[in-house]
Amino acid sequence: MRFELTKEYLEKIEVAIERQDNEWLINTLKELHDADIASIIDELEFEDGAYLFELLDDETQGDVLVEIDDDVRDHIISTYSSKEIAEQIENLDSDDAADIIADLPKNQIAEVISHIQDNEAAEDIVDLLNYAEDSAGGLMQKEFIRAKLDWPVNRCIIELRRQAEDVEKVYTIYVVDDEDRLVGLLSLKSLLFASQKTKISDLYVNKNMISVKTSDDNEDVARIMEKYDLVSVPVINLQNKLVGRITIDDVVDVIKEEADKDFQLASGISEKIEANATVWKISRARLPWLLIGMLGGILGAQVISGFEGGISEVPALAFFIPLITAMGGNVGVQSSAIVVQSLAKGNDMFGSIFKKLAKEALVGLVNGLFLAIVIYGIAYVFGNPALGLVVSLSLLTVIFFAAIFGTLIPLLLDKWKIDPALATGPFVTTLNDVLGLFIYFTIGILILGI
Amino acid sequence: MRFELTKEYLEKIEVAIERQDNEWLINTLKELHDADIASIIDELEFEDGAYLFELLDDETQGDVLVEIDDDVRDHIISTYSSKEIAEQIENLDSDDAADIIADLPKNQIAEVISHIQDNEAAEDIVDLLNYAEDSAGGLMQKEFIRAKLDWPVNRCIIELRRQAEDVEKVYTIYVVDDEDRLVGLLSLKSLLFASQKTKISDLYVNKNMISVKTSDDNEDVARIMEKYDLVSVPVINLQNKLVGRITIDDVVDVIKEEADKDFQLASGISEKIEANATVWKISRARLPWLLIGMLGGILGAQVISGFEGGISEVPALAFFIPLITAMGGNVGVQSSAIVVQSLAKGNDMFGSIFKKLAKEALVGLVNGLFLAIVIYGIAYVFGNPALGLVVSLSLLTVIFFAAIFGTLIPLLLDKWKIDPALATGPFVTTLNDVLGLFIYFTIGILILGI
């Protein structure tokens, strides 16, 4: 029964759009989940997607807008008036509505908000727009259910029924005092099975209650929800007043985006890029790293040119340039990857820098020694022990330093509040290349006596 | 109010353990969340952690066991008898209990199960042990709440109260027919606000109901829950019978682990390694990649040695070896990173291989042309246009091929059912190094007429 978007299915949709067979399209879409409609629109050409979107009713349009890719959304929204946009997003959760509005051109934002019929909803959106996008405030929604400490269960159920109209998914009821300060949690389960006269104050729990502040960072919220296995977390302001809640589905998106960003940074891609971005946009996102890499290559050429005499005399020295640079790069990336992941998990506080460095240096020594022995053995067998000694000693030294730099650089970047994932990219590799070449040729000249 | 594990706090705990101040420790631990106790034990020395664990009551011991690192858990569990382990895990959710039991030595598994008092719980665990660890069956728990279609609300509440004793968190009630086949969902919210006489068949929803099969892959489950914003998903067997449910907290762990694994693979680390693993273990996890890298370096040396005459005549040719290899490596990693992420999201079906290749080749041409012009300009200014032409033409060619291989290799790996994240590591880099050197020296010899 699960929907799967096949190539054939997509072609059927395309044919129906071409034929303007609206009846078939509307009936087909009616059976689908919003997320599936969104994935169809994402895959269609812009114009076809906009045609399909037009066929949906206001409420579904809003739900689909939340799910489609940013660039497709921008394109579709630009074809609608402010009033139409207001109608589409009116039924959305406040956080989703605020996200869509925040992406609009500046001069259109106030206009769309003025067209939202429901005053309370408009106020919630205006309030949410104040928070930074990557903070708990920017992630939260204003729809949640609250109960007062002194309510009995039967009154609570009546009050909640009214509140629940606006709240699509209820996980936990937040218990507040007369000043709207969060004092505890109440599960729907305990409410469902309690007798009518019980007071909320006898049902709620406040041991180990976890909440976040509006100013908390997105990623901290994700870490907390992950650590404590929460499906929703209440958000409080500076006065400890309950102002919103964050649900796990939004946090899963944060976790995925963060992992994707780290992976891209580590791979030398500097902007968030959708798979269907233009060739020009993709090229631009990659160019900065390539320029850094090229700069490193030019520096490397400088280093080698300083040893031109040595190469003239023993051209075989040049053979192992790629070996030295590649190994330095590989070891550097390995070391920094571990530090980057450890930092991303937020558990860097105990291992002091020196302890970490000592460990990585030791790992570098172990692997460096092993590889140095192997390469010396190979050189010995092929009858060039002197050059073998140069390569194996250099390899050991380069791996040792690469391990240290690979550990140190992400730690320093993190201290300077720069995303440490940068370090696993061309940055460490380039540094290790230049340093490695210098070590290699210096050792070569010393041992070969050139 | 939120717990933060500082160095000072940890030292206080360590001092209290040394003094055997059990009263203070027990009172301190009582105030903490299980996840926080687990993070303390993770950070302590093995023996201190085991001491602290010993002070907890059976139920907390079980909850903490679920949260601590694998190696710490193995160590702690090895000090307990099968009967004690059974007592500790008795109160856990079936999936958590099964996970712990599955990690025990083979001969101990049956023994621990025989000591579990609650027969039904033991049966659930035995059943769960049958499923592959990375399948929906291996992820699911047997605790869930089910209602029959023909129950009225009041009977439903009575039945559910009995069922709910075993179920810690209730998100959704699953509605089944007389054959236990899943037919729909019922929210606690709708049950709470419904009148007593309403039939479940009038309350439940079955439009767009999402379920997974026991045999579905972990990562597919994660994708589905993410796509449809689910906090729990029912699991059905081959006969469409409801056999369990998967909750979002377990899926968040799958998503995180998958992202970590991809990042590590892409960084050349082959085993899952905890931050506190031994130097020996860390070294071993990295060595395979370094050996591949070294093999690549040796192949590179072979290629260059084939052009020894050229280097003797024009030693400056050697200067740009690192530039060529580094740029090929960088471009290859950039191209493969995009493919790997795209595959990880499960959306590879539309862009046929050729379309993807054409796009990446175009990006390679754009960036390659830009960089080739820059490097030619630099060489021209410094008065060596012939060598500049060699480097810039080689760079363009190498970048072009690196973009194509970087795209092709992960797609091929995925087709051969090998994790494509492997491709962003030393694999692509090494191939590009060897190929790049060959291109560079060939062009060099042709243009310089050596």
Image (cartoon, coloured by chain):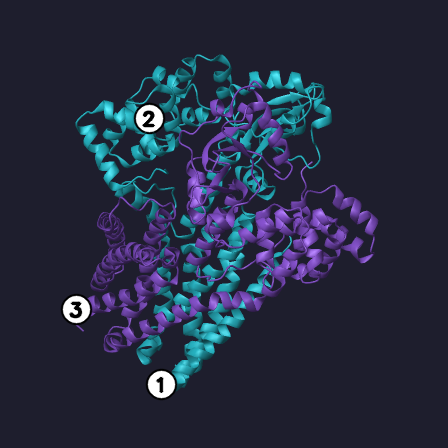
Chain colours: A cyan, B purple
Residue at (60%, 36%) from the top-left corner? B169
Residue at (50%, 25%) from the top-left corner? A168
Where is mark 1, residue-wise? A382
Task: Tell which tag, 2 or 1, sits nearer the viewer.
Answer: 2
Q: Are the residues at dot 2 and dot 1 in contact (C-beta closer than 8 Å)?
A: no
Amino acid of disc 2: Lys
Where is mark 3, residue-wise? B446
For marks 3 and 2, give the CA distance: 65 Å
Please determine if labels 2 and 1 lie on a single subunit: yes
Residue at mark 3: chain: B
Q: Is residue A425 above or below residue A36?
A: below
Q: Does B6 sit left or right of A294 as displayed?
A: right
Amino acid of disc 3: Leu
Bin the neighbour count of mark 2 within 10 Å (Cα to Cα): few under 14, some 14-19, many 20 and up.
Answer: some
Residue at mark 2: chain: A
- Is residue A54 visible to us here? yes
- State the image coordinates of residue A94 (x, y, percent, origin top left): 48, 23
Q: Nearer the viewer, residue B376 or A101?
A: A101
Q: Does A279 sit left or right of B144 as displayed?
A: left
Where is mark 2, residue-wise? A30
Please determine if labels 3 and 1 lie on a single subunit: no
